Image (spheres, grey):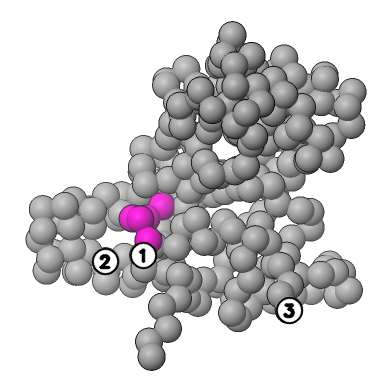
Amino acid sequence: MVLNRALAGVSLVARSGEAIGVIGLNGSGKSTLLRVIAGLERPARGTVLARTTPVLLGVNAALLPELTGQQNVRLGCLAMGMSPQEAADAYSDIVELSGLDASIHHPMKTYSSGMGARLKFAIAAAANPRILLIDEALATGDAAFRARSEERMARLRENAGCTFLVSHAAKTIEETCTRAIWLHKGRLVMDGDTASVTRRYREWAAHAAKRQTGKAAEALEDAFGQGHDTAVRVTDLFDPSASPRHVRRG
């Protein structure tokens, strides 16, 4: 039996103040990586260590469709540990960032997928998490929303936070992130500055789109050659009694 692994041998270190873009085709392991970091999936091998609890914002994040956006804002804020007063204080900022205006009073089931994703991003960002994981949310809005969300991510980084953004789009990664990771079939191809990684990714994607199999394979192999393994050593800065960031089963 062949075991199909979503991720294999991925090792990296994320630091405060970084905005890390995760790029790759569908099925490359991008969303799985975020879910492992968030503690929603347990890796078969390896460990995820984090100083604080990561907040995962995904387009499939659960909000209640029968309730209005306004009601979901309150529930979402409370679920992230905010007090009722903190949730009330954050409300106006969340609505402004989401760009929903009067639609905030309509049931969530009437929203498009883009409207829902924008609201989820605004709710997650309001908690000012130290580690924010974003799965494709920024690809769902118009230019004005993207500008607002990029500004908010910059503020998160200024507060010594760390953000991960998953996207198919190299342009989104370039406009938003300070560092990029390219995954392909569960393997880490490149990890480095945004411009270098996205340039290599575009070169490979262009060949793949034109079905130039040989050139695509050559570009991919060359990109692998530009990368390097990251060795992670746990020091006494970490609390050895702390639980791993993945879920426990059984």
Q: CA distance from mark 1 to mark 3?
A: 31 Å
Range shown magenta: 23-27
The answer to whether residue 190 is visible is: no
Percent x, y of residue 160: 73, 42
Q: Residue 38, located in which quarter of the rendered image?
A: bottom right
Amino acid bearing label 3: Gly
Amino acid bearing label 1: His
Q: CA distance from mark 1 to mark 2?
A: 9 Å
Label 1 vs label 2, nearer the camera: 1
Query: Mark 2 and mark 1 in contact (Cβ < 8 Å)?
Result: yes
Q: Name the residue that disc number 1 marks.
A: 184
Q: Residue 126, located in which quarter of the rendered image?
A: top right
- Mark 3: few, some, or many residues within 10 Å (few <14, many ≥20)? few
Which comes sooner in the sequence, label 1 or label 3? 1
Identify the residue shown where x is 63% and y is 78%: 46
Q: Name the residue that disc number 2 marks.
A: 220
Is residue 170 found left or right of 230 in the rendered image? left
Which comes sooner in the sequence, label 1 or label 2? 1
Identify the residue shown where x is 46% and y is 32%: 113
The answer to whether residue 53 is visible is: yes
Percent x, y of residue 227: 41, 68
Label 2 vs label 3, nearer the camera: 3
Q: Name the residue that disc number 3 marks.
A: 250
Which comes sooner in the sequence, label 2 or label 3? 2
Identify the residue shown where x is 68% and y is 62%: 39
